[in-house]
Image (cartoon, helix red, strand yellow):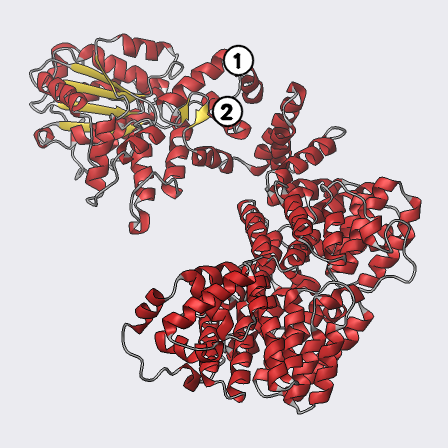
Amino acid sequence: MRLFDRSKELHILNEAFTESTRRSGRFVIVTGGPGSGKTQLLHEFLAAPDRSGARILQGTAHPAERDRPMSLLRQLLRNGEVLPVPAGTARPTGRNAQSTAGNAQLTARNSDRRPGAEFSDPDIATTEALLRLADGERPLVVAVDDAHLMDEASLGAVVHLLGRSRFRPVLVVCTTSGHPGSGHSASHAELIRRPHRRVRLGPLSERGIGELIAAQSTAPRPAGVGRAFHRATAGNPLLAHALLDDSTRFGRDMDRPIAGTAYRQAVLSVVRRGESRHLRVVRALAALGAPSSAGVLGELADTTPAGVEEAVEALNSVGLLDGHAFRLPAAATAVLEDMDPTACATLHARTADLLYRSGAPAGDMARHLRAADRVPQPWGPGVLRAAAEQALAADDVELCSSYLNLMLRDCTDPQERNALSAALARAEWRVNPAAASAHLEPLRRPALDGELSMRDTATVLRHMLWQGDTELAAETVATLVPAHSPGDAQILVEVEFVRQWFYGVALPARSPRGAGGDLRRRTPADRYGGLAAQVAVLVGGVATDDSAAAVAQALQGRKLDHLNLELVAMALLAIAHADRPAVAAEACDALLESAVERRATTWQALLGSVRAEIALLRGDMTTAAEGADRALSSLHDGSWGVLAGLPLSTAIFAHTAMGAYDEAERVLKREVPEPMFRTVFGIQYLRARGHHYLVTDRPFAALNDFETCSGLMRQGNSSLQKGIPWRSDLALANLRIGKARTARECAEEQLRLPGGHSSRARAMALRMLAATSKPHRRALLLREAIDLLKLCGDQHTLSQAYADLSAAHYELGEYARARLVARQAAREAEACSVESPVDAHLLEDPGQSEGSEAEGSAILSDAECRVAGLAALGYTNREISGRLHVTISTVEQHLTRVYRKLHVASRSELPPKMLEHRIPKLSDRWAAGHSSAG
């Protein structure tokens, strides 16, 4: 390992060695905190080429050997291949000391004595042996690493050596921590009182860290990365090297410090080599997890505030802390993981108790109770419950669940256990409804018996509905409403409203007070800003711009916590089916973005399904298919419950429309819950499967599915029938098997339904009725259907209606008009990523010259194009006036100019002329504005 930023310190050591070779003993003390590079500096100094002629005795003191006299000195002599003084040898004095320097007191490794033999006289005689080594021609270098951990006897021997080496070629180098309290013995005081030079190893500079990084990696690095590493380690070489190893591991680009295994090990090395009281303080800091006062730390670490400040100063100097906080969270984690589990739990329990007595926030206390795995009485449960609510509000479902599970484990009161189970289910529902089921299933009977709070009861009821147990949910609502306050009854009203209108279940035979009957009249404005009431107005009556806008407004600015997920989904679908899919899409996108930000998986899955359904209603098959597939992958099958029918039906419809029949078959192979077919989601699934059967030449299988839908719809909420055109589905299937009369009856029955219709449902019925009508009547019905489809924005069905109209004109012999309409059908099909529904020969345009399209656009003005396009389709002047919101006189004037410019005498000649000049049927601006309306 190369040294960086240490040239000055190394120069001092080299200078001291040079002076010692002139028979002038020198003593150097190298100080620095753990990881500052003292050992590496010592090794670099001893490995220098000019040290080859010196006798080097090197050793490292260890805490475990502090009670073993002369242990360090023995290590020095062993490492220097020096044999001990034989027992009973007299200590030479005066001139005899030098005359006997060459005696067999010391030999090389090849002596017949073992180098590891024990010293018989481990005191002055051994020190004299060291002095004799210095009396030769070779300089003596004694290097002691971690000298502050030396045993007393060895320390005394080194002091004695220093006192006798003033005029000998002796250099003694000792590295020490340099912190107060490193050694307080008389021998240590005597050691540092000896004349010496002190080398203080400070942290590496930012430039030094940059050099270290450059030596480690030759790859280009972002600007500021050296500053980031310096800030993370405060220049501690050991920590910097370790952090650099982690950051460049596996060849990853080094754009920022990444703490991993090497860094954690380095942290533990630094901590273990420090003082024991420092270790207690750093553990207390790691447990607290946030800066705290010296008094609090002192109580946890069993030391005084002054001791805390001393430890904090030391820990700052070695790069672990910045003030009272860890520079990197991984350091605190490493410290805690290194503790004995029982001791760590006890520390967290003491911390929680101390924080409770200090009036700390519930979240801080709960974190330590969780780490301690304890619920102290009587204050623990209240703290954990409050912290669980805070965690859920912060979208940390895992943390919330851990607090509630800890409480539930130790709770013995049945009523409290039920409340905890319901709270735990609400938290886990956000990310995994299947996991919540385990907590809610045992609460069914307590909910039916009225033993739960109304909020918890609603949680259980929503679970019942999600799983398809709609009848028991209705029974529970009917049983509980009379026994509760109006506020509680309102919660159940909402549940019943969702049951009837979202799940599409039939009204109960006996409506509970305040929950049944006509919800448009009986649902008051609730705590959600009147959302349920306004949705009831939208789905139960004639949809208007005001009613749709009111629902969209009620969804805006609401936190997900304060909204009923199923009610929100129903509101969005209601807006979309009320011919305002663009409004629904905008509101859904905003809610979906919030769900993603808050990591609410269940919300993401259901809202994603709704968004895909909205795309389907607009004819955007690619978005619908991708959105439905993405939603299905968000939750596993067991979590979807009966709502699986929503994304499944959308996926089947979309893949089938795009001709991806294999993909549709793949979706159809997924298992679905049987209770799903007792809800509207099962009906939509059957409809989607039936349409898939139709296009894959299985009309009788399709007819069977549609007839099943018929039976289920008649048993369910009849008010939903105007938005689900199952009669049109039946008409289509009957047409395919040759039963035109039955098909016509089904279409007419759909059109006779009382109340408002969605434009899409009515348009589909008109198409089926047109299919059973004569050509002239067919064209009129199809034009009406086209107007409705433009209003609701369903481009896919619109392309089919245009194709039908083109076929009707062709059958009437109006070939030019047929080609004109066919082009529009092809354009609409291309816009929604489906295959053109018209024959290729209708799109052919033989004999047209290049540039005629531009010529046609220049011939007529935009207003004339609009009038000419409608006239070419067969609209009367009055109908054109109504559609374009101009007077009949204006229409006549435009037509006069069109006839003159195109050289035609009547509107019957318009279609071929428009084809000849490639004039669009409607202007792009007008068509685009109307095809996306609502």
Instruction: Return the residue nearer the eye: 391 or 42.
Output: 391
Q: In screen coordinates, is 899 left or right of 474?
A: left
- Give the quadrant of the N terminus: top left
The picture quadrant where one finds residue 318 is top left
Q: Residue 847: x, y in percent?
A: 31, 84
Which residue is more in the foreground, 488 or 214? 488
Q: Nearer the viewer, residue 894 or 501?
A: 894
Q: Pointer 2: residues within 10 angstroms few (<14), some, or many (20+)?
A: many
Q: Is residue 118 left or right of residue 361?
A: left
Q: Residues within 10 Å of mark 1 (few under 14, many from 20)?
A: some
Identify the residue position indicated by label 1 in the image. 304
Residue 203 vs 242, above or below: the answer is above
Residue picked out by circle 2: 280
Of mark 1 and mark 2, the one earlier in the sequence is: 2
Q: Secondary structure at mark 2?
A: helix
**On the picture, is 442 further left or further right than 587?**
right
What residue type is disc 1 on? Thr
In this view of the protein, which residue sits in the foreground, 536 or 329?
Answer: 536
Q: Secondary structure at mark 1?
A: loop
**Residue 76 seen by the camera:** no
Residue 698 on image: x %, y %? 62, 87
Would you identify the image quadrant in which residue 501 lies? bottom right
Q: Is residue 869 above or below residue 501?
A: below
The image quadrant that residue 377 belongs to is top right
Q: CA distance from mark 1 to mark 2?
A: 12 Å
Residue type, numbered disc 2 = Arg
